[in-house]
Image (cartoon, grey):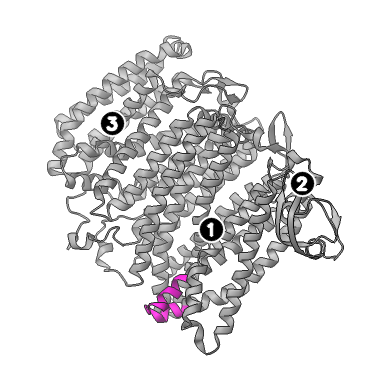
Amino acid sequence: MELDPLLLSRLQFAFVVSFHAIFPVFTIGLASYIALLNGLFYGTGTPAWERLAIFWTKVFAVVFGMGVVSGIVMSFQFGTNWSNFSQAASNFLGPMLSYEVVTAFFLEAAFLGVLLFGRGKVPQGVHLFASVMVALGTFISSFWILSANSWMQTPAGVELADGMFRVTSWGEAIFNPSFPYRFSHMVLASFITGGFVVAGVSAWYLLIKRDVDANKRALSMCLWLLLFLTPAQALVGDFHGLNTLEHQPTKVAAMEGNWETRSGVPLLLFAWPDQEAQENLVELGIPNVASLILTHHLDGEVPGITEAAPDEQPPVWFVFWSFRVMVGLGFLMIAVALAGLWLRRGGRVYQHRGYLQLLRVMSVSPFIAVLAGWFVTESGRAPWLVQGMMTHAEGLTPSLTGGMALFTLIGYIAVYAVVFYAGMYYLTKVVRNGMTIQDEEDEVDEVERPKRPWSAAHVPFDDDTAKVEG
Amino acid sequence: MELIDLSLIWAVIIAFGVMMYVLMDGFDLGLGILFPFAPDEQARDVMMNSVAPVWDGNETWLVLGGAGLLGAFPLVYSVFLPALYIGVFLMLAGLIFRGIAFEFRFKSHRSRHWWNRAFCWGSAVATFAQGAVVGTYIQGFETEGFAYVGGPLDWLTPFTVLTGIGMMIGYSLLGSTWLILKSEGHIQQWAYRVTPRLLAAVLVIFLIISFWTPFIDPAVWERWFGHLRWIWVLPMLALACMTLLIWSLRRRHEALPFLSTLGIFLFTYLGLVVSKWPVIVPPDHTIWDAASAPESQLFLLIGVLFVIPIVLVYTAWTYWVFRGKVRVGEGYH
């Protein structure tokens, strides 16, 4: 059997980037939430805010650490598996990715230590400032990454000569046409992810009646936040879709499962796209609604997949179904947020066991929705690596063999499995340990010395540590 | 535009970054390699505690170097990484395992021996891979135009195995002298005992590599036996540092052994740089061939010049805060 280095490299990149994305998508939202909690405590002096801030900073430390560990690999993947692409696009991508690293270091060097270890050691205002800067830093980091990705979707401000992209306008390249939409969509996604995770954990604490006062506040905050953000996300997603329709019509056609260019296109709820036959085998839809969404006319004309030659089409079923998973979860999240508003009357929201259990389950939904969304936009670009300018095949490392790619694919899966298992196991311990304030003596002892993010969470890894230490 | 040679500035920045990485991550990787040979578990606690506050700061230089290469010398990035494909994977896997070992060893008891193993093997594998990268750099790469066209295991030759092992012993020497500086009592005694043996091994490998290299690359021969006489100062200084190390060990100095080992690494590294200069992707491509467009180099330079001083100040501050001996039992209560 011939191993295809192209397919294996794409799988490897998809695996590594998906695994990595889970962490930043959560920490970006969580960093802002922590800054907000610190701000509330600074303003009101209510101890509950501080308890929440301390607890969520511990969680932040662990997740941030896992994000860093899994992200190191990303900065080498471009060179190992996509060297032709790295070489060709280096004039633009090099500075973008480097600026991300520079921003991250600046943030870590200057403020992360203060946020994680400075409480009580620096003035409260300085600590608040550090937490705001960490939150800001996460946005700046994602700014560079999303700009680089958007440029691959809607390249601008460059010219291609002798196989090298050369930047003609930094402004146009960085603020390329899809960037503002992608950035807004992603920032909202991060807030929603943070919101649902905090809501889910608070709901669990309320179910087992721990730290009821603080967790009521946290839950209430999250539900208000989600009530506004989840519909806003649907709206921003719609604008993003219209932007994609303008620049990458084939991707939108695949999302809608629409093969022929025509007017009055139905919104398909279910379909089985058949790439060979270039049609849907089964379909069930609402007449004219896709046209209405995409053109704002019931009989508007929507481009079809067949506008692109078969070898320039993305894998339709994958794009189609990933899109449905994302949108479906999005509407479910809106419904859950609305239900929260309805249950607020008389404070039932804090006691309704069914609803609290539902929130626990829902805390994974934003992660799935975000990954599905990335599957749509990345595989929807196929076969292009840089839309209209460079294909995946052209960007691949020429010396790469299938065997090498398979070796590292399995290797990365194995390494990440260990990291993920250890990290999640530990994170569960942190959450179970709850909001009990640790013995402050630990901190003075300088055992687990500053800077390593995970040492901010003073929780033993395995159960019998306490006994041995005692 | 051509008033300033941006490629030259970038070459200096990258060379500086790599040097910082080798000197700083070198000693904490070296402690990982020495881990199984430590006299007891207490010594291992001290060894790990002595680098715990600084190791991840040390590794930031690696990431900064990697990203800087893509921005400033993309050819290096797009030739080295495909050519060293398997080696890069091993290095990353090693660094990840030792990274999580740092976090979890402190927090565990029952599973501690597993984290010990992860720390040791991760350090050893990552170091070997780094040594092999150096060896491959000396050997050169088979390229066509701007792409690597050699095989997946071209990098693994007797020469690169030797440089890999050399790097492991060299880093161990950095580790053992660091431990002399940071420990006391029986742990320090142990470090004093192993250091001369490591130094002897380093000297042997240093000499073999030095005599072997000119035969691998005629340009290196030309460089050393041509008209540039002053460069012989560098190996002389490296040997002087070795002598200083021996002397300071006899006198039971505490800081001088580590400082003279840093000197050995510094002058050997500079010797390697002048051997190849200005070739950055051997055998053919110079720093100017490998450079990205000037506007890209300039755009990135602004940010890097801003952040490097901050990272340096912060690094110095961290080392200052955690100066002094690490004691047995410190941190475990």
Q: Nearer the viewer, residue A281 or A463?
A: A281
- At which x and y percent is residue B289? 60, 25
CA–CA distance in space, label 2 to label 1: 36 Å
Magenta-highlighted residues? A200-217
By secondary structure, the bulk of the magenta-drawn segment is best described as: helix
- Label for residue B261? 3
Q: Chain of mark 2?
A: A
Q: Is A211 contained in the magenta span?
A: yes
Q: Answer with left or right where residue B331 lies relative to residue B96.
A: left
Q: Is residue B275 above or below residue A206?
A: above
Q: Which numbered disc flags the more N-terminal residue, 2 or 1?
A: 1
Q: Is residue B224 in view from this perspective? A: no
Kindly state the secondary structure of the residue where label 3 is placed.
helix
Q: Is B173 contained in the magenta span?
A: no
- At which x and y percent is residue A246? 79, 53
The residue pinned by badge 2 equals: A278
Indicate the amino acid at tag 3. Answer: Thr
Foreground disc of the pair 1, 3: 1
- The N terminus of chain B sits in image quarter: top right
